Amino acid sequence: MTRKNRYFPFVSEALADNDKDTILFCFHHAGGTAAAYRPWTLKANDSVMIMCVELPGKGTRRSERMAADFNEILPELSLNIAEISRDRKIVLFGHSMGAAMAFYTAHYLWNHLDRKCEKIIVAGRQAPKKENPYEFKTYMNDDALIEELVRYEATPKEVLENKELLNFILPGLRQDYILNESSAYHGEVLDIPIVAHAGSKDYEADAKIMDLWQHMTTSTFQLKLFEGSYFFVTDLGNKYRDIVIQEAIKKRED
């Protein structure tokens, strides 16, 4: 595996094997890996290529040093996206921490590499200019981090009650929160469409909170509500994947 494609370990198909004009790049949540979207690549679709983004130290790249500052990997990540896309259209999708990464990647692609994304699709995270006061902060202790896991209802009870497993999980999760905190907002605004998705029971990123993403672009904005809590993006399975694909190819509506 070359360094270039380490960022995209799971793809729906080889670049040379199709004539699709759009690539959908998927950014995972804190504590996740590119494998979160691997199921999206396994079911054929006629519209887009799907590539799952893997960061250093995560998943298939766990032997590498884990990134502590998103700004350090942003240039290389963006360059890989630009180079592998070539003349294809670029759409970025991100959930939770991945939503912020999609936003900053789109901004870097345009301002530093002259590659403009078609749009970004974001889910489950407040807009970059709005801090979540309830979110775990890395100066807090492990008990607070465990409370975060409980609140998101994504970790099995058996894991939460197993000290050995928690000791294995928590350091990597804390590192993701360090990475998340490194994405400080400095007034960036996009000029491409933003589509925001909110879970009906995701109380830390509900429709009202996700609606604030409209201030992150000078272009069009859409907000859509889905049944579910924080992990509605995976709980809804291929149904949600197909909706994201349709959003990716939907033409801009001025």
Image (spheres, rainbow, N blue to C red):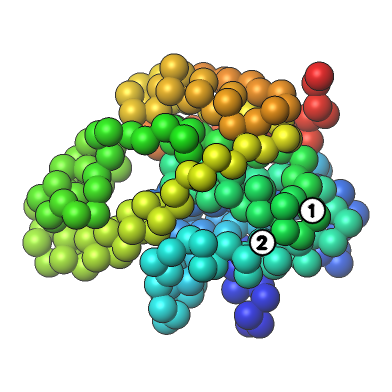
Look at the numbered disc 1 and give the secondary structure of its residue: loop
Q: Is residue 244 above or below residue 2?
A: above
Location of the N terminus by quadrant is bottom right
Residue 197 image point, x, y percent? 53, 28
Name the residue located 85 percent from the left edge and 53 percent from the top edge: 88
Of 208 and 240, the residue lying toward us: 208
Q: Is residue 88 above or below residue 231?
A: below
Q: Which mark is residue 115?
A: 1
Residue 28 image point, x, y percent? 49, 51
Type of amino acid under label 1: Arg
Query: Which one is earlier in the sequence, the residue at label 1 or at label 2?
Result: 2
Kindly tell me whether residue 188 is visible in this rendering.
yes
Question: Residue 208's quadrant in the figure?
Answer: top left
Residue that protrudes farthest toward the front in the picture: 186
Name the residue located 51 percent from the left edge and 20 percent from the top edge: 211
Q: Which mark is residue 231?
A: none
Residue 16 image point, x, y percent? 86, 67
Label 1 crowd (10 A; few <14 / some 14-19 / many >=20): many
Q: CA distance from mark 1 to mark 2?
A: 9 Å
| Apparent side of residue 119 relative to residue 89 in the rendered image (left or right) | left
Type of amino acid under label 2: Ser
| Apparent side of residue 82 relative to residue 239 in the rendered image (left or right) | right
Of 127 and 168, the residue lying toward us: 127
Residue 160 image point, x, y percent? 15, 51
Q: Which mark is residue 78?
A: 2
Q: Are marks 1 and 2 in contact (CB under 8 Å)?
A: yes
